[in-house]
Amino acid sequence: MKIKAAVVEKVGAPFTIKDDIELHEVGPTDLQIHMVASGICHSDEAIRRGDASLGYPVILGHEGAGIVEKVGTEVKNFQEGDHVILSFYADGTCDNCLRGVPTQCRNYGDYNLSGVRADGEDHFQENGEHISDMFNQSSFTTTTVVDQRNAVKIDKDLDLRKVGPLGCGYVTGSGTVFNTLQPKPGDTIAVFGTGAVGLAAMMAGKISGCTKVIAVDIVPERLELAKELGATDAINSKEEDAVAKIKELTGGYGVDWTVDTTGLSSVITDGIKALAQGGTCAAIAVTPHLIELSTWNDLCVDDKKVVGVNMGDSIPQIDIPRLLEFYKLGWFDFDKTEKFYDFSEINEANADSGSGKTIKPVLIIDKDYDPSK
């Protein structure tokens, strides 16, 4: 089957939309998905520019939403016409999956970041030549084929143009708080970086009952949005010392939890310094930057901890429906971070994401989709 897709030909190349990409057929446990929309994530850009590699040429995108067109012979819980959000793939059979942590699937890298399907075959080809995929999904396409474990079924009354980023950015930020840090009511949290992931973490802190939810950024407009979405305090770290201000806001102690979404060495360090005794900093950005720590001064004496978190330690089939319930209640207004772009505007959308002009660009792949029908 020939489809249209946005291809990155080599490291640093722009996205080129092609209409002659050959898509793998539907296997026994697969779903063929008509793509309606896809978010653009900073992880897509990290691979495009070569900070990480799946092999080139590559079709990126891993925040897809669409409609099931065809199901494999062994698929149990999906049927044609279902609306779905796509996320990462885990086999469900390894020890980590069986204990409920699919983000630590023993074969996570092979399944999601090897550039081929979980069965080792090419997901996409052009003129018989291999094209790498991403997350066993590659949502910058008009149609894709995924394993049923990539998909989360959602209600048909939800707007598919909005919900794709729940499959990565929003579930990563919120899951870091709900699943990994697990703050108690009355705790305090500071989030460094108020992009989509950071704002999701911040909203999760509010939902969890944190009495101080502090947003840190250098963009005034983002800080204003953070306050609209529930931040108790907003700090422009370009204008004032974020660590000093956080300690001022917490009686000199610091916060119980910090989340860094920037990946910048100096900001991660501030995230650790802003912790109270016994506090934990979650570092969740895809970044090549390094940090230097004194085990004695930075960690041991004050019993501080630094943790890395992959995909919010989430189980998409559980966490995404939970986020949608919060959304319906008005507690998780993720769509206020989004801006729609036509699929043909993918390079502009990606540039706007990189510059900070747009928090969460969403590509509208099917312009004929009508959420009212």
Image (cartoon, rainbow, N blue to C red):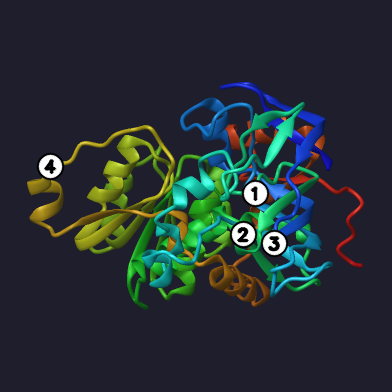
In the image, which disc is placed on residue 150? 2
**CA distance for labels 4 and 1:** 41 Å
**CA distance for labels 3 and 1:** 16 Å
Q: Name the residue under label 1.
A: 137
- Between label 4 and label 3, give the one nearer the viewer: 3
State whether residue 18 is above or below residue 109.
above
232 with respect to 42 (left or right): left
Residue 208 x %, y %: 44, 74
Name the residue rendered at 89%, 67% in the picture: 372
Q: Which amino acid lies under the numbered mark 2 shown in the image of this protein?
A: Asn
Q: Which amino acid lies under the numbered mark 1 shown in the image of this protein?
A: Gln
- Between label 3 and label 2, give the one nearer the viewer: 3
300 with respect to 150 (left or right): left
In the image, which disc is placed on residue 28? 3
**CA distance for labels 1 and 2:** 8 Å
**CA distance for labels 4 and 3:** 52 Å
- Between label 3 and label 1, give the one nearer the viewer: 3
11 with respect to 209 (left or right): right
Q: In which quarter of the image is residue 28?
A: bottom right
Question: For the residue labelled by badge 2, is the local secondary structure a helix, a strand or a loop?
Answer: helix
CB under 8 Å between callouts 3 and 1? no
> Closer to the N terminus: mark 1 or mark 2?
1
